[in-house]
Amino acid sequence: MRLALWQTQGFPADVDANLKALEPQMQAAAAAGAQVLLCPELWLGGYQVPEQMAALAEAADGPAAQRLADLCCEHGLALCYGYAERHPAGGKPYNSAQLIDAQGQRLANYRKAHLFGAMERELFTPGEGFEAPVLLNGWRVALLICFDVEFPEAVRSHALAGAELVLIPTALTPEYRVVPELIVPTRAVENQLFVAYCNHSGVENGLAFLGGSCVAAPDGERLGVLAGGEGVLVVDLDRSQRESWRERFPYLEGRRPALYGELLKR
């Protein structure tokens, strides 16, 4: 699979501008042979927009999703993007990520389970579970968002469900560079899967982002890394690399779940 990550500063609280900026990126990614384009966390309306967040929220099948589905069909490219999802019962919105395939079908919609910091906990309703991996271009793909990857249990849950690739939109600031540099590769190697981690760039309403988007392979190698500015990272994923690593380091097969019961009680 050829995967593209779009690291962008975006337009805070301006959905139309972000949609317009996306279209040439989708065209370029498709021309480069990519099958999937990954965008950052809350990319659609912006991350550092607390006062506008509730108003920016829309349904998973709302107008923006429909426009994005049309773009996926037009360019023959799957898309994973972060957005604020309107709560169906009128509560605080969810911090969500949605995956749409190249035929415009909505394959998965994940609501962030582990909210980070006071602002997120004030603005959002936490998700209550993980979406099962879905089949995309022959690959079993799962979704997480930002802080989720810092919990070993989150990625391990997807690995045990058969995921081969985890797509992670994020909004990470510079003081947490350990996440893409160390934690993301660790999650990849300990679960023998690929992890794609796509961050914002630049400064949004006074909040600086690290950049540093990357893709980590099952052997822990980062197959590609972006610096701090805007850019697109295109990476080829080789399934045989995952199979070889699983034979050499059988972490999943070597587990002894009967010994870990106390973890669930604490």
Image (cartoon, rainbow, N blue to C red):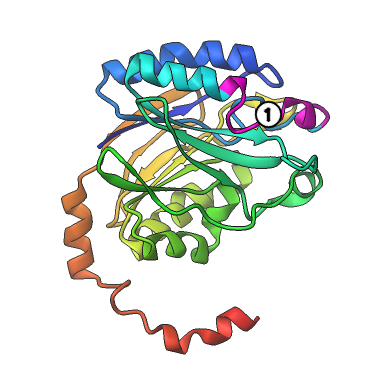
Q: Is residue 251 left or right of residue 131?
A: left
Observer able to see residue 173: no
Q: Is residue 262 left or right of residue 189?
A: right
The residue sitting at 58% across, 17% down in the picture is 18
Vertical relation: 2 (above or below) 172:
above
Please tell me which residue lies in front, 219 or 27.
27
The residue sitting at 51% across, 66% down in the picture is 153
Please tell me which residue lies in front, 193 or 181.
193
Vertical relation: 51 (above or below) 88:
above
Residue 27: horizontal and vertical position, in percent? 36, 13
Determine if the magenta segment contains residue 60. yes
Q: Is residue 166 left or right of residue 247?
A: right
Residue 133: horizontal and vertical position, in percent? 40, 51
Q: What kind of residue is marked 1?
A: Glu
- Residue 5 lies in quadrant: top left
Residue 37: horizontal and vertical position, in percent? 40, 29
For the C terminus, the quadrant is bottom right
Please tell me which residue lies in front, 158 or 244.
158
Observer able to see residue 49: yes
Q: Is residue 25 left or right of residue 51?
A: left
- In magenta, the rendered stretch is 51-64
> Which secondary structure, mark 1?
loop
The residue sitting at 32% across, 71% down in the picture is 252
Please tell me which residue lies in front, 189 or 37.
37
| Residue extending farthest bottom | 259
Residue 59: horizontal and vertical position, in percent? 65, 31
Circle 1 sits on which residue?
A: 58
